[in-house]
Amino acid sequence: MMAQSYEPDGTPSGRNYILYAYCLMSNHIHLLIREREDTIGMAIKRIASSYVYYYNHKYSRDGHLFRERYKSEPVNDMAYFVILLGIFTEILLRLGS
């Protein structure tokens, strides 16, 4: 296992984005991410294409998993960020994960 290094602001280094939370649903995914070098579009593309490759390989299938293009909403303050983390936690508890 490789040791994690951090930037001066406390964020993990060596990534093009920071993934704070996610919730994988049956036909979509919720992500709470922060852009770094990648734009939000590129980060979503990396995450989605990696997952689709994994899923299709595991279940011997091909094609799309997600129906629509991603939607995004900026999180501009810490209070809203904390609310979103709570919502992610609530969703996961309801799903029993």
Image: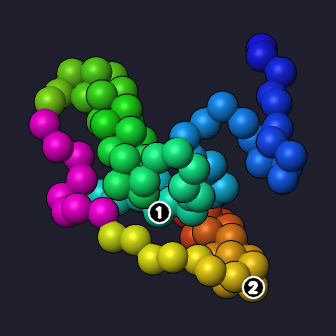
Q: CA distance from mark 2 to mark 1?
A: 19 Å
Q: Residues within 10 Å of mark 2 (few under 14, many from 20)?
A: few
Residue at image point 80% right, 28% down: 4
Majority SS type along the magenta span = loop
Position of 91 relative to 49 (above/below)? below
Q: Is residue 88 visible?
A: yes
Q: Quadrant of residue 41?
A: bottom left
The answer to if 42 sits in the magenta stretch is: no
In percent of width and height, residue 1 lies at: 77, 14
Do the residues under discs 2 and 1 have CB atoms within 8 angstroms? Answer: no
Image quarter (top left, top right, bottom left or bottom right) of the C terminus: bottom right
The one of 56 and 85 positioned closer to us in this rendering: 85
Q: Secondary structure at mark 2?
A: helix
Residue at image point 33% right, 23% down: 58
Position of 46 relative to 77 (above/below)? above
Which dot, 2 or 1, sits closer to the camera?
A: 2
Left or right? Give the position of 53 relative to 19: left
Q: Amino acid at mark 2?
A: Ala
Left or right? Give the position of 65 relative to 41: left
Residue at image point 52% right, 45% down: 37
In percent of width and height, residue 68 lies at: 19, 63
Q: Secondary structure at mark 1?
A: strand
User: What stretch of residues is rendered in magenta?
Assistant: 63-70
The one of 69 and 5 positioned closer to us in this rendering: 5
Q: Which residue is mark 2?
A: 79
The one of 70 and 7 positioned closer to us in this rendering: 7
**Residue 11 image label:** none
In percent of width and height, residue 54 lies at: 36, 27
Q: Quadrant of residue 49?
A: top left
Q: Which residue is mark 1?
A: 30
Residue at image point 82% right, 38% down: 6
